[in-house]
Amino acid sequence: MPKKAKPAENGKEEGPAPCKRVKVEAAGGPSALNFDSPSGLFESLISPIKTETFFKEFWEQKPLLIQRDDPALATYYQSLFRLSDLKSLCSRGMYYGRDINVCRCVNGKKKVLNKDGKVHFLQLRKDFDQKRATIQFHQPQRFKDELWRIQEKLECYFGSLVGSNVYITPAGSQGLPPHYDDVEVLILQLEGEKRWRLYRPTVPLAREYGVEAEDSIGSPAREFTLKPGDFLYFPRGTIHQADTPPGLAHSTHLTISTYQNNSWGDFLLDTISGLVFDTAKEDLELRAGLPRQLLLQVETTAVARRRVSGFLRMLADKLEGTKELLSADMKKDFIMNRLPPYCVGDGAELSTPGGQLPRLDSTVRLQFKDHIVLTLGPDQDRSDETREKMIYIYHSLKNRRETHMMGNEETEERAVLFHPSTLQQPSLSPHHN
């Protein structure tokens, strides 16, 4: 998923303040995550920190460490994924590279120890025990129901894809060198203990993955050990490395990641093309041809720069006076690639509408409102230039959990079309019943 990138050359940008540490004592009663709503789940993940505080003080700014003395929550975390789960998973046909990576950090560099083809559990366990290798399991929510349940709710909460990886590291070993990611990171410690070192970012809110040499990043801004039930958050760009202390049992932690390519810059790239396309239908200057040989010149001319600046100011003025800002790809990409609604059983309720078939005068209510996006677009069934805009309701009800976040799998666009005149708030609104 992440792309490799060069770190900033000067490394002088000042990073965020050291992370806050919160100690939580057991509440006495059984502790569990709250699945009543997407916001309830997130609040229970970061408890006792309040959501408002989290987004005001930590999100995209600085790490947050929550250390909990809560046996019930620790037991629940341990149930999410264990080293012992690998035997049954390997029997289902896991492959090196696609599903599992085996690696170790040697002299500050990542050494990949993957074999070819299918993963055999005995060989995997041998590399784990004898070579002290870390096992990285990609996107376990494809197979573990409770992780599907968690990540589906988080995708509803963030409105962004949510992936995960499990890292299992033997005692006295480290899997990855110091690096930073292009995603917001939520860590749940499942088994054993993991020692973490966080460093100030050289590229705050990084857009690409990058590896840093340890001799160039200085001393850690924070250093701590996670135990089962503990929680850690840090923003994209935060340099980090982690190892399992010697003399202890192995460590298993879950890395939940989100907000990859989900910035204002990405949104601008996504929407500006549609704005230009629609404006050019009405503006003669935008349809005028470029000066001869403009594309052959090494540097853009001052005249061309002034023209582009003027067009951008004109588009900004137009945007101020319109209610429409159409997404070209981001909305569809999210809805087509996200998890389907969590369900128990064969999932028949996802594809079976309730009630009778609608008539032309019927009011339609959406059952899975958190799993649709509404967008306006031209009627694809008409090819003439006068085709009017239609309401597209894209949904994820038939998305395949087995391919979630795997990247190279083909996805199918699923949408229901309505004429704008049929829109009667709150019937088709994703925010109302």
Image: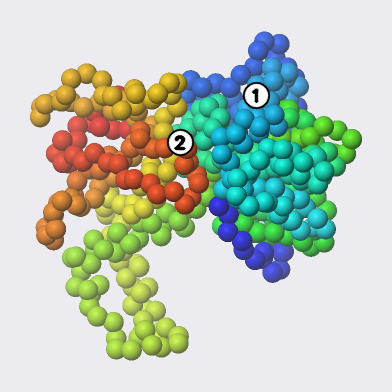
Residue at (28% x, 82% y) in the render: 290
Q: Quadrant of residue 112?
A: bottom right
Foreground residue among 395 and 259: 395
Asked whether disc 2 touches disc 1, contact meaning CB atoms under 8 Å apart, the reply is no
Regarding residue 186, the answer to whether it shows in the image is no
Residue 148 position within the rendered picture, expressed as x and y whole percent measured from the top left: 51, 31
Amino acid tagged 1: Ser
Foreground residue among 57 and 187: 187
Residue at (78% x, 31% y) in the render: 192
Which colour scheme appears in the figure? Answer: rainbow
Residue 3 position within the rendered picture, expressed as x and y whole percent measured from the top left: 58, 59
Residue 149 position within the rendered picture, expressed as x and y whole percent measured from the top left: 51, 27
Q: Where the C terminus falls, by quadrant? A: top left
Which secondary structure, mark 2? helix
Residue 382 is labelled as none
Residue at (33% x, 37% y) in the render: 395
Mark 2 and mark 1: Cα distance apart in space: 20 Å
The answer to whether 141 is drawn above or below residue 319 in the figure is: above
The answer to whether 183 is drawn above or below residue 40 in the figure is: below
Regarding residue 130, the answer to whether it shows in the image is yes
Foreground residue among 37 and 412: 412
Which secondary structure, mark 1? helix
Amino acid tagged 2: Arg
The answer to whether 425 is drawn above or below residue 275 in the figure is: above
Q: Which residue is mark 2?
A: 401
Sequence-wise first label, 2 or 1: 1
Q: Quadrant of residue 424?
A: top left
Q: Which residue is mark 1?
A: 79
Label 2: how many Cα within 10 Å (few below 14, some 14–19, many 20+) = some
Q: Is residue 43 left or right of residue 194?
A: left
